[in-house]
Amino acid sequence: MSNHDLHIGLWILVADWLIRIAALLWIPARTRPSAARSWLLLIGFVPLLGLPAYLLLGHPWLSKLRRERQARASRLIRQRQAPLTALRWCPPDAFSAPADAARLVERLGDFMPTNGNAVELLDHYAGALQRLIDDIDAATREVHLLYYLMRDDTAGRAVAAALERAARRGVRCRLLLDAVGAKPGLRAFRRPLRDAGVSVQATLAGGLAWRRSARMDLRNHRKIAVIDGRLALTGSQNLADPDFVPGHPNREVVARVRGPVVAQLQALFASDWYIETGEVLEVDAPPIAPSGQVPAQLLPSGPAYPFENARDVFVALVQRARRRAVLVTPYFVPDEATLGALRVAALSGVSVQLILSATNNQRLTAWAQAGFYDELLAAGVRIALYRPHFLHAKHLSIDDDIALVGSSNLDIRSFMLNAEAGLLCFDAGVVARLREIEQDYLRESDVLEADAWARRPTWRRSVEGIARLADSFL
């Protein structure tokens, strides 16, 4: 070996260790411990790959402009709610779980609990999509849609056609789509929709444009439709055919709502529109006349907020459960706080039921979530795997009086990196309806038994353990 080769080898060795030392000093101070361990492990094995990956994906940073706009939007939301005391829901027991949850949600996500809402849960994919199209066709003033995913397929074309019809009859239409998740829809529909008079905007642009706004894999995962400021739809369903992932037809839950909480969904859309475009929308005042009897409240979350809103509320709800907690999610990669809350609730005698999809379109995520089953089963958590479809619905019910339906998965990505929206309902009727849906899942699910699960092959345990190490990357 020549001296030249020795010098190159020495410089590579020095650079290798300098990267490791720099990572050890830099990453733990800027990343939470569980994520820091994953990143340090990756950099320790492959420093020249791990360091660039961390610089791109290691910290959920947003541009100063986006953070300032979010802070301004939050201030405006709080100021405009302050005079609306007639709409505020005041639970009869100020120390109950619903009262605690409502206070926490308001402090985290700005929106107060409101009286007088009507909530309809839609559990049929084609039916929920048709209701959205019918609502757009019935609009007379304004249509606002915010979605993570829109495809150039039958569903996407039907929604685009409804928007064109609305715009051509003089309805003001705005469509806000995630730049990466809805790339096929933006490519297919942006020009014809704009030609018809629809305002179309992409949010969190991918490619090189990400450097001006946010970390490149931050996504707006919300699904919101607001029609004329009088009704809204939100939940887990995108603007796409149910089988847009071949072999994994989706099953979803959508909440169709009327009443004051519609104004909260309208304000969240306006906030996202403002953060992306700088345009301040004049939104309608919330309806004073009640539309129903359901106390409801919007829970927004995302990296623009100071805390992990969705994670904190999920943990608090499970901790306050006294009899029963049912959690439904397609992706289950919990952080320590969520895992601990589920374990402690079950060990305390609460009936904790986790319903997941038996099929999963993310192989690494499927391996990682299976790595949590042993601990949960040992604590008494019941785990059911739903067979017929890819269970993409995201909701939970607590005891008899709290339901949450939204877009957030029970995973670190949704908690830390995605902008999400959830609708809390403090109502026994909504919980009973959600229980019917949960029971339907359970009738077509396989129940995991601790003894049978413990007999799985050793190689599978090893793969699950390795996949869990990547929980902060999933």
Image (cartoon, rainbow, N blue to C red):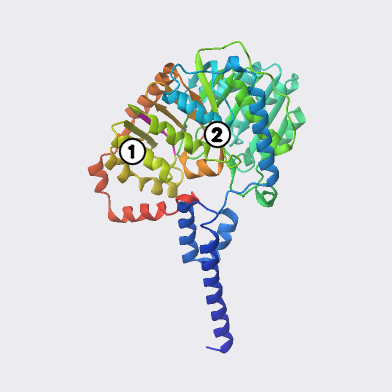
* Residue beneath the point at 66% across and 50% down: 207
Q: Nearer the viewer, residue 420 or 345?
A: 345
Residue 145: % across, % down? 64, 28
Is 309 in the magenta? Answer: no
Q: Is residue 227 above or below residue 22?
A: above
Residue type indicated by callout 2: Leu
* Residue beneath the point at 50% across and 66% down: 46
- Give the main secondary structure, helix, strand or loop, of the magenta stretch: strand
- Per the model, the C-alpha gap separating discs 2 and 1 is 24 Å
Residue type indicated by callout 1: Val
Residue found at the very far left of the displayed protein: 451
* Residue beneath the point at 60% across and 17% down: 85
Q: Is residue 415 left or right of residue 176?
A: left
Q: Residues within 10 Å of mark 2 (few under 14, many from 20)?
A: many
Residue 462: % across, % down? 34, 56
Residue 131: % across, % down? 56, 20
Q: Is residue 154 above or below residue 10?
A: above
The residue labelled by disc 2 is: 108
Pointer 2 or 1: first along the chain = 2
The mark found on residue 344 in the picture is 1
Residue found at the very far top of the displayed protein: 289
Q: Is residue 232 left or right of residue 333?
A: right
Q: Is residue 143 left or right of residue 255?
A: right
Q: Nearer the viewer, residue 396 or 367?
A: 396
Residue 425: % across, % down? 48, 22
Q: Is residue 221 visible?
A: yes
Quarter residue 95 falls in: top left
Q: Which residues are magenta?
A: 325-330
